[in-house]
Amino acid sequence: MTNPRPQGGTKAATVLQDDAVDLNTAGITAEEQREAQEKYPLSFLHLTGVTKTVIDWIVVAVAVWVLITAVSAIGSGFGMAVGDRAADIFQLAQNPFVGLMIGVLATVLTQSSSTTTSITVGMVAGGLPIEIAIPILFGANIGTTVTSTLVSLGLSGDKVMFRRGFAAASVHDMYNLLAALIFFPLELIFAPLQRSSAWLSEQLAGEDAGPVGALFDGAGAAVSVVTEPGVALLEWAVTPLGVVTGGVTLILIGVILILAVISFIGKMLKALLVGTAQKMFHNAIGRGPISGVASGTLVTVLVQSSSTTTSLAVPLAATGKFSLRQIFPFVVGANIGTTVTALIAAFGFSGVEGQTALQAAFIHLLYNVFAALLIMGAPGLRTLPIKAASLLARLGAENKMYVVGWVAGVFLILPALLIGATMLL
């Protein structure tokens, strides 16, 4: 079914509409160009040309330094606040289902799985048991899907476009829920991710890791040298507050810095790379599942935000240019690409702390890689997210209360109820 042209529109309006489609085919729409420019954080400097590009990349590098420093500060603050009492402090989260819901809620509230995973990596380095961290990392994958769902609501004025756009958004929900349903019970029973991530981290950062481990440990030590002055300054600033209060304050400062810097990096990279990302999207999305997964991974690594990547898919699916079956692999790739942030965060630590932080980052990476291999490789599983998303989109297009119930129920009400029930028991 094709969308009719606006009734009563002028010839100029028709030309503008056709121009928008041409720009979209080229890889970037005029609206996205304007949006990227409006959100460009350094617009007040009025930079142009090579000078702008050089300064932009320097600023991105400094922002990455702030990110790693903030994660290191969280690890230091967590160690100060709880010492060797991490297991007691996180008694509530020892229930894996509660940990899962904490990951969902934390990611929904921060609108960034990268924030949740980076904070978790820092806390693991500070003493949080890896068994508690694993469900939180699972939950982060589920929580991150809400952003593209909210983006799709902007299409609610057009029933057909909303159905397509919401299907593209909710296929991310369905995929991550299916992955959790498969791997969460497996992890609870057999712990394959914990075991494989422990082995990998030992090979790269353990005492007997050999040349590769020495290289990784050297890289971690080098990063620590660069970030230690910032962490030391923050520790000095909270010292008058005492060990526990100072540690909690340091954690809060780290969280605030991560929230700010991840948002900032996302805006900077989107302004720098939105054209490139869109062109890659258009060039690769229709070439098959492997190409779609690879392009989704690469675009997300470039823009450092799976939410940005999946949000790109919503308007393009809404126009009908790409089918849900073509969009799906790209969304899967976004899940893999977003794990890079946690790996970057792990470089803020060295020694034993570096090994445990790296293990947490590897868990997030392996979970998403294994889920992609299993679900995309099994025809029976690969079609389930598409069918479920299509059904929900049809219902939501007929009655928006289905959309409200889905978003509120899965991302807010259910997590809150599970956490509350556990606290009462």
Image (cartoon, grey):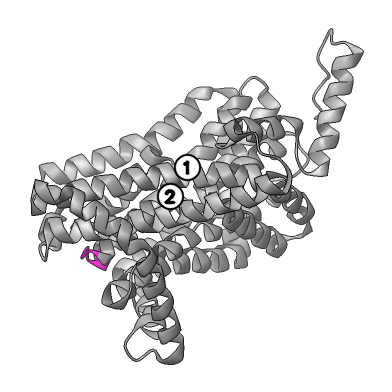
Q: Position of residue 386 (x, y in %)?
A: 61, 48
The quadrant holding residue 195 is: bottom left
In front: 226, or 371?
Answer: 226
Q: Position of residue 44 (x, y in %)?
A: 58, 31
Task: Say how many tags the image has.
Answer: 2
Q: Secondary structure under badge 1?
A: helix
Q: How would you rate the neighbour count of disc 2 (Cα within 10 Å): few for under 14, some for 14-19, many for 20 or more?
A: many
Q: Is residue 277 left or right of residue 87?
A: right
The label nearer to you, 2 versus 1, is 1
The quadrant holding residue 225 is: bottom left
Residue at 43%, 57% (x, y): give it: 65
Q: Is residue 300 left or right of residue 53?
A: left
Amino acid type shown at disc 2: Ser
Residue at 78%, 59% (x, y): give it: 287
Q: How would you rate the neighbour count of disc 1 (Cα within 10 Å): few for under 14, some for 14-19, many for 20 or more?
A: some
- Residue 336 inside the magenta-drawn segment: no
Numbered label attached to residue 347: none
In front: 251, or 201?
Answer: 251
Q: Which residue is mark 2?
A: 113
Q: Position of residue 330 (x, y in %)?
A: 64, 54
Amino acid type shown at disc 1: Ser
Numbered label attached to residue 263: 1
Residue at 61%, 39% (x, y): give it: 167
Report the Cα–Cα distance between label 2 and label 1.
12 Å
Residue 34 shows in the view? yes
For the N terminus, the quadrant is: top right
Q: Which residues are magenta?
A: 126-131
Q: Which residue in the rendered view is the most extreme toward the top? A: 8
The quadrant holding residue 85 is: bottom left
Q: Position of residue 418 (x, y in %)?
A: 24, 43
Residue 39 shows in the view? no
Q: Secondary structure under badge 2?
A: helix
